[in-house]
Image (tube, rainbow, N blue to C red):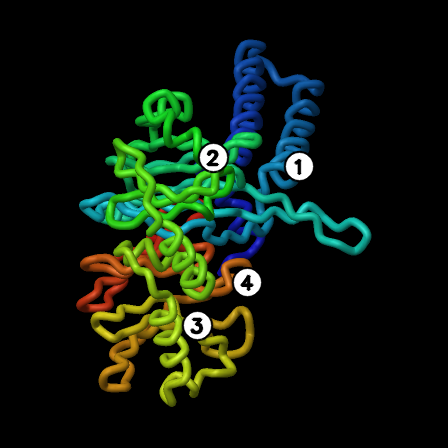
Amino acid sequence: MDNFFQRYINSWRFNGWFIHDIFLGIVIGVGLLLLLYAVFKRRLNLALVITFILYAFLGNLLMIVFGLAGRRFPINSESPIYTDDAQKIAVQMVEGSENNGTSNGISQIISHHQIIAINMQTGEKQWTKSSSSKETLIGYFMGGLLVHHRDGDYGKLSLLDMKTGKEKLSEKEFTDKHKQLINVLDIGSYNIVLLENNLYLEGVDGKFYRFDGKKLIEDNKAEKYLSTKFFIETDIPGYFASHNQALEDYEEVRKFSSNVLAEPAIQVYKNLDPAVLDVDLQQQTAIVSYRQTKQESADSIVLSYDMKNHRIIWEENIGVVNAEQKNPGVRTLENYYAIQTGDEFLLLNKDTKKEMFRYQLRWNRPIQ
C-alpha cells in the first residue's frame, strides 16, 4: 500500500527527479560534514548533540517540504511511449504534480517534468533527464530522440541518444546543421508530425514542408497529415507512435473507435469510463480500458476487442490508474504492449499476456 511512511522511507534515496535529488544531496552533504567534524573533535559535547538534533529536525523538514518526502506526487504521461528501432528502450516524458497548498480556495500545483528511459529487456532504469513544459518529444528520428523546444518566440530542435540520454545534436548544433528547417520551425509542436521517417510540418511562413533528415522540401500533403493527427489524437493520444504510416482520412479511425464503444460487449461497461486506447484497422481490433467500479481508486482493466467476430480476445487487470492520468497510455510494439498507468509503467507479453515487469516512475526502479 502507498502510504506516508512508505513514501517517506523511499524518499531517502536518489531517484533521478532533479529537485528531489538536489535537496537530498544537500541534506546528506551537511550530515557528512557534521559527522566528519564530530570525528575530528573526538568528543561529543552538548553543543554538538544539540547541533545534530537541529540537523535531524531541519533536514527532515527540508525533505518533506522541498524533497516531497512522504508526500503524494502523482504522475501522468506528457508524451506517447517511444522506442528505438530495436524496441529495447522505451522513452517518454512524464509530469509529476506537487501540491503546494491552497490560495483563495484554489490548489496551487507545481509541475515537474522528466524524460525517463527504461530498458525493456531488464526492466531497469536506462537514464533520466530533467525536462520542462517547454519541451516536447517528437519521436525516434535521425537515429535519436527528437525533442522540440519552445525557445522564446522561436522553435528549436535537439537530438538525444536513446541509449545514454546525452545530446547527439544540441539546439545550437541542430540549428547550424539544419538552418533551413529551423528558420521555418514554429514555436508550437502541434504543427509537427513524424510519419514513415519523415517530418511533416507547417512553417511560420504558412507553407507546408517535409524534412527527411537531410533536405527540406515543400509538400502540401503535410497539411492533411497534420489535420489527421489533430483529430485522431484528440480521441486516441499517441496513436501515431504505434502507427506512423501516412494517413489522410481520420474519419475511418474515429468511426471505428465509435463503433467499438457501441458494441454490446463494450456497452456493458458504459458507466465505467470505457475508452479506446489504440486501434488496428488492418486487423480490425482495438485496445479498450475501463474501471472495475465507479471509484477512482478502482483497478483498471485493459482488453483487446475483435470487431470481425464481435468478441473480447483477452483482458488484463493493470492496477490503479491515477486521476491525473485518467486513462492508461498504450504503445503497441512487435512483441509487447507497453502501458503507462500514471505512476507506473508495465510491459505485457503480446502472446502470453504475462506481465514482464512493472516500473515505478516516481522512484525510477522496477517493483521487485
Kind of residue at badge 3: Ala
Q: Please name which of the two marks, 3 or 1, marks the residue nearer to the observer.
A: 3
The x, y position of residue 359, in whole percent, is 36, 52
Q: Which residue is mark 2?
A: 149
* Chain-order first, disc 4 or disc 3: 3
Q: Which residue is mark 4?
A: 323
Q: Please name which of the two marks, 4 or 1, marks the residue nearer to the observer.
A: 4
* Chain-order first, disc 3 or disc 1: 1
Q: Which residue is mark 3?
A: 275
Taking the spot 43% from the left edge, 37% from the top edge, the residue there is 148
Furthest residue toward bottom: 264
Residue 61's label in the rendered image is 1
Question: Is residue 219 visible to the viewer in this orientation of the structure?
Answer: yes
Contact check, label 4 and label 2, Cβ < 8 Å: no
The x, y position of residue 363, in whole percent, is 44, 45
Taking the spot 45% from the left edge, 71% from the top edge, the residue there is 299
Kind of residue at badge 1: Leu
What is the crowding at mark 1: few (fewer than 14 residues within 10 Å), some, or many (at least 20)? some
The x, y position of residue 17, in whole percent, is 48, 37
